[in-house]
Amino acid sequence: MNLRKALVGLFVMMMILSGCGKGYWVMKKSKLDEEPGVRAHVNYLQNEKPDRRGFKVIDINEGKKLVVVSTGSSKVELEAVSVEYLENQTVVTVKEIEADSDEINPYILIGLDKPVSKFKVVNEDGEEYEIGF
């Protein structure tokens, strides 16, 4: 009987923990070729808008969304901090890290598990990134 209670308890804990994900993932840049729309936008940032600091939300496969955030400076790289899903807005927070990048316009690709229609991207100081471009 104690084994049965332990197994039920373990099952309940696994179910609770499986619902506690971050709500986002960071797509590896090596997978750009799998998403033509994302690849085209990244090429645009690198070749035509190297100083563009902002973000764009792109629909990717399986009905999911990906946020491409660019720094506009080869001296700053990005790290995902959090994604917060509010009632009517998705807020993506990134950390800006001073570094010499190999990219002309460093960027990060953040996939969203359950996006809401309005989007906002901010750094840890609360400064907003420009939407769309």
Image: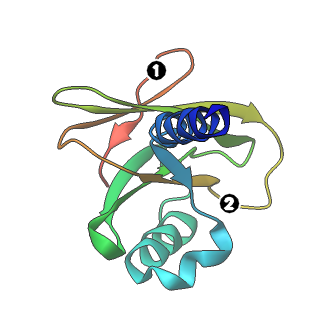
Q: How many marks?
A: 2
Q: 20 or 1: nearer the eye?
A: 1
Residue 51 visible somewhere in the drawing: no
> In the displayed structure, would residue 63 be above or below residue 15?
below
| Residue 73 tag number | none
Which image quarter: residue 83? top left
In the displayed orientation, state which residue is furthest to the front: 1
Specify the color scheme. Answer: rainbow
Residue at image point 40% right, 47% down: 55
Q: 54 or 87: nearer the eye?
A: 87
Q: In which quarter of the image is the C terminus?
A: bottom left
Q: In which quarter of the image is the N terminus?
A: top right
Residue at image point 82% right, 40% down: 99
> In the displayed structure, would residue 80 be above or below residue 35?
above
- Labels 1 and 2: the sequence-earlier one: 2
Q: Which amino acid type corresponds to the residue marked 1 in the rendered image?
A: Glu
Residue at image point 46% right, 70% down: 44
Residue at image point 42% right, 83% down: 36
**Residue 131 location (% of width, % of height):** 31, 42
Q: Which amino acid type corresponds to the residue marked 2 in the rendered image?
A: Ile
Per the image, the residue denoted by label 2 is 104
| Residue 127 tag number | 1
**Residue 77 location (% of width, % of height):** 70, 43
In the displayed orientation, state which residue is furthest to the right: 100
The reply to whether dot 1 and dot 2 touch (C-beta < 8 Å) is no
Residue 15 visible somewhere in the drawing: yes
